[in-house]
Image (cartoon, rainbow, N blue to C red):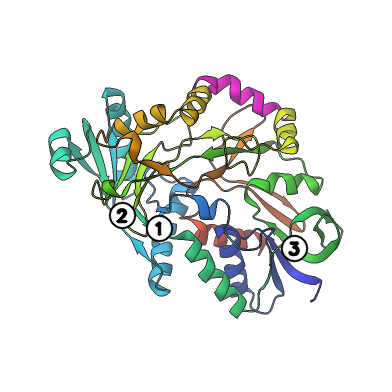
Amino acid sequence: MQNNFDFIIIGGGIVGAATALTLSQRFPRKRITLLEKESDASLHQTGRNSGVIHAGVYYKPGSLKATLCRQGLDETIRFCQQHNIPYQQCGKLIVASDATDLTRMESLQAQCEANNLEPHYLNARVLSQRQPNIRGCGALHIQRSGITDYRAIVKQMLSLCVARGVILQFNSPVSHLHETSTGMQVSMNAETRSLSADFVINCAGIYADTLTRSQGLKPDFALLPFRGEYYRLASRCDHITNTLIYPVPDPDLPFLGVHITPMIGGYLTVGPNAVLALGKEAYQKHQFNFRDLAQMATFGGSWRLFSKHYRQGLAELKDSFSQRGYLRRVQRYCPSIQSRDLLPYRAGIRAQAVSLSGDLLHDFEFVQSPHALHIGNAPSPAATSALPIAKMIVDKIS
């Protein structure tokens, strides 16, 4: 196999796959390879989210996130239609449980209108009529939101990549990047293998900051792992809703709250919460990684973040270990769900960028050098927005 490429893409999640596909379309004669440390693609963030196709409800009108999300909604659905990938535009209800939620909902409604999403306000009586299992003092209905299977999308993207000559290399963890005057040297498998490229695109998700620093660059942020824990609902709950049900989120945090999701496959899940994990792949409560912990502990922004949000952090941690506390969040808007209905389900890890000042970064972060572009933060809804994000990445390096 050749060792020299025009482009090397690191990371086999949906952003990496979409970038490889877009590059191969834009530069059909270039030598392109995609490196993935696992034995298959999309085993982490992409394959462990709730599968929601977001419509752009939560994003400031005119912002990059709002623009990419609206484009991504249309492009994701079109990609699913073209390649017979299952999806449903089941719509979303954002349910207010108290007066504070109603006040916040007014701002959400204004954002939705500015983003051309045509939200419909439902009072408590209409909400109860339309969704007998859901309780609230009001709700916003956004019809364009939907669900899909993002792993199936990535599989199809990579199949198209291979057909266009892209080389996929699994079991290829990147350990170090070295930039020269003419290109990049990429060391893999604890530096027992090496490749070279004119240009490297780092789409490594939670490890993107680690690889950025391995090149000698010094980003002013770090990616902290927040574990999102889900439950699958017992089959007796399958009738509860065929629509996404969300609480009204705290506008100061980038997390959307524990929601009910009708999944492709015909069952429901609830989640996720947002617990600071003790490792970048600490999917279980008891898991930890000394190296990851050391990196978090030596990053000043971690301590400043905790000092700003320790109450929310402790509450998340408590409800992570207390199913009763987790259940209370769901019962605020769906009281019929009981403890016996919460069945085990996979957890995910969200890569959340945090600044040196301890602020949660809500937007994209890029670090660039002459021969590399590092996607330091691709925040939710990165899965929905993957195709337009990939076009933006390719435009940046073109």
Q: Is residue 106 visible?
A: no
Label 3 sits on a secondary structure element that is strand
Label 1 sits on a secondary structure element that is helix
Q: Is residue 21 above or below residue 54?
A: below
Q: Earlier in the sequence, mark 3 or mark 2?
A: 2
Identify the main secondary structure in magenta.
helix
Q: How many marks overall?
A: 3
Asked if the residue at tag 1 contacts the one at tag 2, i.e. Cβ–Cβ closer than 8 Å, the answer is: yes
Is 52 magenta? The answer is no
* Image position of 277 (left or right of 219): left
Residue 34 picture location, percent across and down: 68, 66
> Callout 1: 10 Å neighbours few (<14), some, many (20+)?
many
Residue 59 picture location, percent across and down: 42, 42
In the picture, the disc for residue 73 is 1
Q: Is residue 160 visible?
A: yes
Q: Mark 1 belongs to which amino acid? A: Leu
Is 310 magenta? The answer is yes
Q: Which residues are magenta?
A: 299-311
Give the residue number, with chain letter if any, for mark 3.
199
* Front position among marks 3 and 2: 2
Q: CA distance from mark 2 to mark 1?
A: 8 Å
Viewport quadrant of the C terminus: bottom right
Give the residue number, with chain letter if any, for mark 2.
144
Q: Is residue 239 above or below residue 121?
A: below
* Image position of 129 (left or right of 73): left
> Callout 3: 10 Å neighbours few (<14), some, many (20+)?
many
Residue 325 picture location, percent across and down: 40, 27
Q: CA distance from mark 3 to mark 2?
A: 38 Å
Q: CA distance from mark 1 to mark 3?
A: 29 Å
